[in-house]
Image (spheres, rainbow, N blue to C red):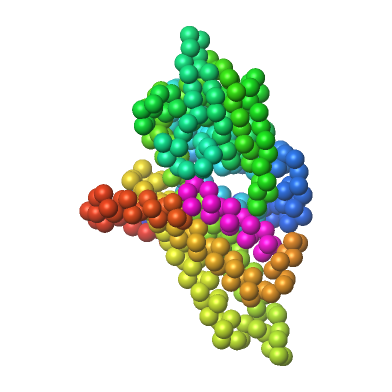
Amino acid sequence: MTHEQDAGASRQAEALLRETAARFVARECSPEVVARLEEDPLGYAPEHWRRLAELGWLGLLVPEEHGGAGVSLRELATVVGVLGAAGLPSPLFATVVEAGTLIALAGEEQQRRRWLPALAGGEALLSAALLEPGADIAPSAVQMRATAFAGGFRLRGQKLFVPYAHVASHLVCLVRADDAPQGLSLLLVPRVAPGVQLTRLRTTNGDPQFAVAFTDVDVPRSALLSASGAAWPHVEATLDRGAALKCAELVALGQRALDLTLAFVRERTQFGQPIGRFQAVHHHCADMSCLLEQARVLTAQAIWRLADGREAAREVALAKVKASEGIPALLRMAHQLHGGVGYYTNYPLEMLYRRSMAAAAVYGSARWHRRRLAHLLATDAARFRRAGAHPLPPTH
């Protein structure tokens, strides 16, 4: 099969996946359902989770030998975009993108055989406990200690912003095993282990986020996913994957907001004519479209490089900066054009704005990724401007 034929088949598969996901959200994810789930203590609907598993979406990244589909990040980005634009609350990022990726990258074969099929089948709910007070993304920020003893490890410390911790059976915890700068390990900790205490945090998005305290929590040696010094590269790869997928979600949120706005300005009348005929409205809509396309193209580049196993730190950072700043700005313009209607809680724009702000903050803010770009440029300018970038995929 030629490169063009392969690309055409990939586009057809993604279009079919997008169509299937759109039918699912149209049937299962009405605004009323989203509003109800935001108030539900679970924060998601178990029946939706089972349906995602039946459709095979939880196992898109899981290798076939472990019960998954074994496809690429592009397909998962398609699903994430459709579900994100609809506002479906679910532990998809916590379980599949974070915990699942860490187990796949850092776990031993026995651990992968145990957890990945259960994850793909929707039987396992997991979460990752990575951030600590200060919420910095760096090895030096990890202070939670794992002290080795004869039978295993004893954990002391605190983690913040652990998504869906209350329904997870286990938490993949990033811990400090020794005082070396990179002396970090990953441990799989039962959520109900003695000494684990959860406190729910109030968030703008309303999603279940928790502070988790670990007070002399003992786990066996079999809980170890990666030994001291080996954890951080796996965490970085997971965070890059999460950042790129959040960019895909932001692009989908922006597209829905633009579609809503264009429909609104065609129908809303002022001074005897639709407001969409006014020049100032034209300019706002054009600016919204520019912001959306910038984020879309950079996100596509990041997703394709990650999916092809190429170095993508620069592309992920560029996409996250533009998407995290541009899509909330697009939503603010949409609110201006809608006026008071946009602030009604039973109108989608309010939910879209909250979701865009939450997505902009996770996996590194625009400011954090801008610093990352500056570091790449300062330390290796030739690498930053490398030639032979992956050709851009179609954006539609």
Q: Residue furthest left?
A: 382
Instruction: Residue at 65% x, 78% y: name it.
Output: 265
Measured as percent of width and height from the top left, residue 249 is found at 55, 54
Measured as percent of width and height from the top left, residue 202 is found at 68, 46
Measured as percent of width and height from the top left, residue 396 is found at 48, 63
Measured as percent of width and height from the top left, residue 203 is found at 65, 48
Q: Quarter of the image holding residue 271?
A: bottom right
Along the viewing direction, whichever of 343 and 194 lies nearer the viewer: 194
Instruction: Residue at 72% x, 72% y: name it.
Output: 340
Instruction: Residue at 50% x, 14% y: name it.
Output: 152
**Horizontally, is 37 left or right of 73 in the view?**
right
Instruction: Residue at 46% x, 16% y: name it.
Output: 148
- In the displayed structure, 269 sits above or below 234; it is below
Which residues are the magenta region? 348-365
Residue 350 visible, this orientation: yes
* Magenta-drawn stretch contains 102: no
Along the viewing direction, whichever of 67 and 116 lies nearer the viewer: 116
- In the displayed structure, 43 sits above or below 2; it is above
Which secondary structure type mostly characterizes the magenta part of the structure? helix
* Magenta-drawn stretch contains 354: yes
**Horizontally, is 27 left or right of 145 in the view?**
right
Q: Quarter of the image holding residue 82?
A: bottom right
Q: How many marks?
A: 0
Along the viewing direction, whichever of 302 and 353 lies nearer the viewer: 353
